[in-house]
Image (cartoon, rainbow, N blue to C red):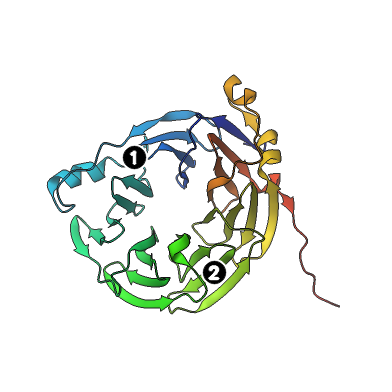
Amino acid sequence: MADSIGWRIWLGDMPLGAVHLLACDPPLVAVWGSPREAYFFGAYDADYLGKLTVPAPPADAPHTANWRDFLDGLRAPDGTWLPVVKAGAWQIHTSYDGRFRVLHTDRDLLVEIDGDITPLERESDEPLAAVALDRELGTVAALDGHSRLQFFQQALAMGTYTLDGADAASGCLLTLPDAPDAALVVAGVQALLIDTAGQIRQQTRARSPLTAVDIAPDASLVATAESASLRILDGRLVPLWQAAVPDLLDALDPLDDDTAAISTNPAVPVRSVAILAEGTIGFVAGGMLGITIADAFEPLPQPRPLL
């Protein structure tokens, strides 16, 4: 993207699912057109790299050989492991090297370490609202419907903490950076950085409910979406830049004539966002995928120390 601020492509009338920025060299974009179909592009050159159709997961238990073959296929065209895949009732989170996984339903929470499946010991029978994985070291965060956040270091339980004022039952977002000491939890208009000892490190409130969030692997940047608006914050949750999604999409290069012909609808919210440490950002709004950089955003006023 050396000569532009990014690109966009229309992938169909149906709303897109999650977008992931795979931090390989160079980065890849994975975007889910449906729960079982992902499309891949080069983040910088916008080259289309192929499609993955995920088969139905095996009907037997995850510790069986059928599941080993199924899990081995959850990769990008270059062999990079996909961070999160929805497979029927299961959601699968995979580490960078593919040796550690979290598999969960709304009730079951399992980890796979070098092919061995271990159930995690939850302190609650309440259904799970969100689960996240640190893909580097294997820290796991699990949030239940009563807003209890539990941390694990791989298969070892670390602690459980109740998030006062967060209503997980009505929808929460949860993400972990690499080698973390804190998880990022979003509930409504509130975003919280909560460390593995249950302490709130940082917090901020948006003007309207947040619809998507991501944290860069090194925790230096956070991207949030408020309906049709995007913001980039630093690792202390201080807002740095913002952009109106319709204006941003209009500024991005369309990859084909079909994309150029689509009018931007300001009422369509952003449902997924991804960010890398160097400031590359991916987002989806309806059937449109956009890839851009922090330089395309407007800087926000920053507090200055008094002399």
The residue that label 1 is drawn on is 79
The residue shown at (35%, 63%) is: 128
Task: Residue 222 in the image: state x and y as whole percent.
Answer: 57, 58
Of 46 and 165, which appears nearest the observer? 165
Q: Which residue in the structure is indicated by mark 2?
A: 192
Residue 170 appears at what percent x and percent y?
Answer: 47, 61
Q: Quadrant of the C terminus?
A: bottom right
In the rendered image, the quadrant that contains the N terminus is: top right
Q: Is residue 66 above or below residue 242?
A: above
Element assignment for label 2? strand
User: Residue visible at 58% across and 46% down?
Assistant: 280
Q: Amino acid at mark 1?
A: Gly
Whether residue 3 is visible here, answered yes or no, is no
- x and y percent of residue 173 in the render? 48, 59
Question: Within the image, what quadrant is residue 277 found in?
Answer: bottom right
Per the rendering, the mark at residue 166 is: none
| Quadrant in which residue 176 is drawn | bottom left
User: Mark 2 belongs to which amino acid?
Assistant: Leu
